[in-house]
Image (cartoon, grey):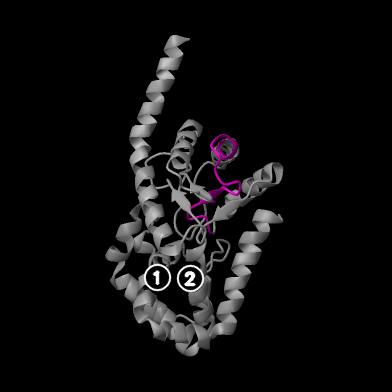
Amino acid sequence: MFLGCRNRIVDIEKIAAKYLRAVQEASSLYRHIESEKGKGNFINEVSMDETDSPQTPVELLVILAAIADAGIPAQTIAPKFTGRFNKGVDYVGDIVQFEKEFNEDLAVIAYAVTKYDLPRNLKLSIHSGSDKFSIYQPIRKALKQTGAGIHVKTAGTTWLEEIIGLAESGGEGLQMAKEIYDEALDHIDELCAPYATVIDIDRSQLPTKETVGSWSSEQFANSLRHNPLCPDYNAHVRQLLHVGYKVAAKMGQRYVDMLEACEPAVARNVTGNLYDRHLKPLFLG
């Protein structure tokens, strides 16, 4: 019994050494934001997903205890799960193992909320969670069984639907979509570098600027829209444009004006993607 307790103490010491500094940094950031925005005026998320390996249930429990001890009223926690959560494309990995880890994490959060007086609305967060269609069924099943909430990070998929809307609009909208692709291709190294761990782009599968320049609205939209059953779909184009948002940011107001000019197609794609392909599978089945 003594040896077992001793081993557990050593495990906790290792976990603390690995994660405590990160929690301390999160606490400093929280205090800074709180001083600027005021307490209770923003939602706090603590992200632990960019690590080498998934957290075990014990590790997650220690992290949550440290968060509570630091006085961070976290409303979402983003752990790392087994498998690849590449930007803008489906989950790659063992779905059975993911389901096991997801359910274990839900149980840990439920326990930590009562044990450490964390916010009762503390939710599990899935980073790069958009377009992970193959794991939405086990997620929905777990949420239905437990009554837990969830946070799914979806900003990137909305940006891609905007480009699809521009392409479908034809004319200047299509030309801007092609311009964004051209610029992303020209700056692929700098755009991909910060996301090397969450993209898998085969550059030989990326069409040339000349090829994309000849595409119709339908060809461009089909290449980018996340539909693996479509013969035109290109996951490599999708991942490149996912990390190419900086191209549009540099366009500034010109990009915003084009979104407004193409609003019907943009709104149709953004709304349909979020509601039909994300919210319904997660919560309605």
Q: Nearer the viewer, residue 171 or 25?
A: 25
Q: Is residue 126 magenta?
A: yes
Q: Position of residue 66 (x, y in %)?
A: 43, 38
Q: Is residue 269 shown above or below 102?
A: below
Residue 262 seen: yes
Which residues make up the magenta segment?
Answer: 112-130
Q: Is residue 112 left or right of residue 32?
A: right
Three-letter residue code for mark 2 = Trp
Q: Mark 2 = which residue?
A: 159
Instruction: Give me the residue at 45% from left, 65% from top.
Output: 238
Residue 214 seen: no
Q: Mark 1 = which residue?
A: 245
Instruction: Give me the residue at 39% from left, 63% from top.
Output: 205
Q: Position of residue 177 (x, y in %)?
A: 43, 79
Instruction: Give me the residue at 36% from left, 81% from top.
Output: 251
Q: Quadrant of the C terminus?
A: bottom right
